[in-house]
Amino acid sequence: MDKTQEYTFNTFSLLLFLLFGIHLLLAFKELAEMARWRILAGDAYKLKDIDLILGLGSLRSTVKLGLRSLSHGQPGTQWLLKAALAFGWVAFLCLLNVAIALLGLTYSLDTADNFGMRPGMVSIPNLKHFYPNNDTANFAAITSDGGDLSTESFMANLYGITSFSYKKGNVSDDIPQSEYWLEQYNNGSWKYHFHDLDYYGGLNVRTNRFITTNQTCSSYKIMNITSDMETFWYFDPATNKYYDETLQELLANFTTYALRPAYDCDRCRSVYAVQLTSAAQNWNNNTEGDIDNHILSDRQARIAAGAIANRGWVDGNGWSYFHYRDSVGAGSYIFGNSTAMESLLSQFAVGVIAALDQLNPRDFVFDSDRPFQGNKLNVIWWAFYSLLGCLLGAQIIFSIIALWFSNSVVVKDGSYISVARLLRPALDTLGGYGTIATGDEISRTFKSKLVYGTRMTEDGLTHLDLNVDIYPSTRFPDGWYN
């Protein structure tokens, strides 16, 4: 999700938790108000105690009731139990708030490895040249002497050496979208996916554009070599003959790559690899070709294919040589394994393009798919379900207890709650004055006479009758009717 969707999710989730918390607090407030009548019916209370018990739906009144209960009676009496219940109820409601807060901590929005795409501007690598020092402005001046090929070949070789530090995996692996990886096929050849950036040096994402190589290699064991290490003889088992070859600048205990001036096809180069050690002497011929699946020019493809042997300048015969120790990736001893040499040269050539994609100058392209960072919702499900289940379970259990407790009130004629309920209509009639109004004040408040009294019916119920004078109507059919 993008930033707008992230803000929307956070807003709705916060609102949901707030509503859930308000619902629980209101629900438990109603349970407390249901239980207050049962408490009032159980004992005689002072007026202040009655007022606090009637306000049990408020945490403030509950705390006051608990503190007031501590000042009643002696230790071990029922007032200490009432104080414990009051403070326990407050602690339980506080625990509910903590549980709701913890519920919001069971999930988080973290930065994901995946990216979303939306229309916009992206930057792609400039594939026209291998630019020295990433300098496009002064490239013409640097190569004005006609040495653009030598300069670019040297940069391509540096790119290839740099690529050995890249992460590597199989084409079937789940490759992270934001990392530069070289991917290997089962046959040993390599593949690289290009990356698009939302701006230069910004967020990058792996695209579906990729480049691959095709190569062949023949390996021959060197049978003898001259003392100046220029001419050597090797045996070809295919023809059952011995051949001699002369190459300049061969070094012992090094892998020497030699690049001849001619090329066999538009997008390939032939590279000779000579390894002179006490363990093996091999001459390997590798043909690198068909760098496909991208708009890379034939010229750039040839430079990448022969970059492992190109140090930026050639000898008088047009040959280029490069030497690698065995501690360097390109100098690994192959011991005559032609398949391993094919894979090594393929990795170097593809690595040149991978480093070009990362290090070369970039051009901006409009009307493309611009990447944006995705977010991943991580939820600790066991904690989420545990907290949610405890909250809902507590509400159900306390609802059952409150219903049973409040419905167990026995209302008798002489009970405190029955008297309170009988006097309630009279108090409502007196409005905001309540029971503190004297008889004279009552008579001045009401213009008509107010008469009340109790009576017992045959079914054993006590009734409170209120009689108020009304003004008669002077015209029929207007009037008061019962």
Image: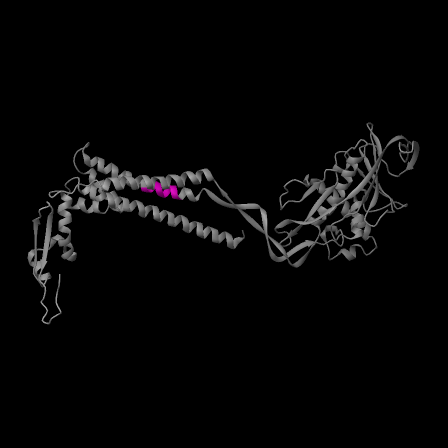
Q: Is residue 313 magenta?
A: no
Question: In the image, 392: left or right of 187?
Answer: left
Q: Is residue 96 magenta?
A: yes
Q: Quadrant of residue 80?
A: top left
Residue, far bottom: 475
From the image, which quarter does the C terminus lie in? Answer: bottom left
Rendered location of residue 271, percent (x, y)? 83, 41
**Residue 225's x, y, as percent?**
90, 31
Q: Nearer the viewer, residue 38 or 318?
A: 38
- Residue range (magenta): 93-100
Q: Splitting the image into 4 quarters, where does residue 382 fall?
A: top left
- Indicate the position of residue 289 as horizontal and vertical percent values: 80, 45
Placement of 122 over or under 473, stated as above or below: above
Image position of 174 with respect to 151: above or below: above
Inspect this view and state whether residue 159 appears: no
Relative to the observer, which residue lies in front, 311 or 362? 362
Q: Quadrant of residue 466?
A: bottom left
- The residue shown at (46%, 50%) is 10
In this picture, residue 35 sits left or right of residue 136: left
Q: Main secondary structure of the magenta part?
A: helix
Residue found at x 56% / y 45% = 112
Labels in figure, total: 0
Q: Eyeballing the image, is 239 above or below 40?
A: above
Front residue (pair 397, 327): 397
Question: Which residue is more in the foreground, 237 or 375?
Answer: 237
User: In this image, 423 relative to 280: left or right?
Assistant: left
The residue drawn where x is 15% and y is 53% is 425
Report the residue that reaches farthest toward the top: 279
The image's colouring method is one colour
| Left or right of residue 67: residue 452 | left
User: Residue 376's x, y, as percent?
Assistant: 53, 46
